[in-house]
Image: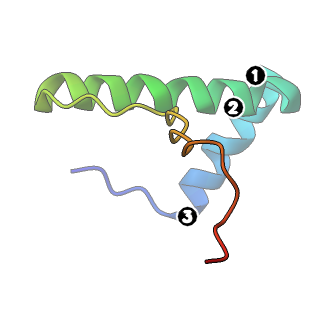
Amino acid sequence: MFDIGLPELIIILVILLLLFGAKRLPKLSRSLGQSARELRDGFTGEKKETKTEPKPRGTGEGPSSA
C-alpha cells in the first residue's frame, strides 16, 4: 500500500523535529503511543493497566530462621 523506505522516514522525522522541536517530540510520541494503545484496547475490549499494584506484605515479621 505505502512504499515508505528509510530515506522517507528520515525526511519525515526531520520535518517533525523542525515543527515540534527536540523538547516536545518525546512528549508527543508518548501521547501518540498512549492514544494508539487506548484505541487498540477499545477494539479488543481489553484493559491493560500501566501501573502495577503493590504486592501485599506478609504479617510484618522478618524471615524465619527455624
Can you name the residue that lies furthest to the left here? 44
Residue 62: give x, y in percent of width and height.
Answer: 70, 57
Circle 1 residue: 19
Which residue occupies 65% across, 53% down?
10
Q: Residues within 10 Å of mark 3 (few under 14, many from 20)?
A: few
Q: How many marks?
A: 3
| Label at residue 3 | none
Query: Marks 3 and 1: CB-CB under 8 Å?
Result: no
Numbered label attached to residue 6 = 3
Viewer-proximal residue among 2 and 47: 47
**Above/below status of 9 relative to 65:** above
At label 3, the amino acid type is Leu
What kind of element bears circle 2? Answer: helix
Q: Quadrant of residue 63?
A: bottom right
On the image, the x and y values in percent for residue 26 come to 73, 33
- x, y percent for residue 7: 60, 61
Q: Choose the circle earlier in sequence order: 3 or 1.
A: 3
Residue in view at x 60 percent, y 31 percent: 30
Q: CA distance from mark 2 to mark 1?
A: 5 Å
Give yes or no for contact between labels 2 and 1 (Cβ–Cβ under 8 Å): yes
Q: Is residue 23 left or right of residue 57?
A: right
Whether residue 65 sits left or right of residue 20 in the image: it is left
56, 42: nearer the viewer: 56
Q: Residue at x 20, y 22 (%)?
A: 42
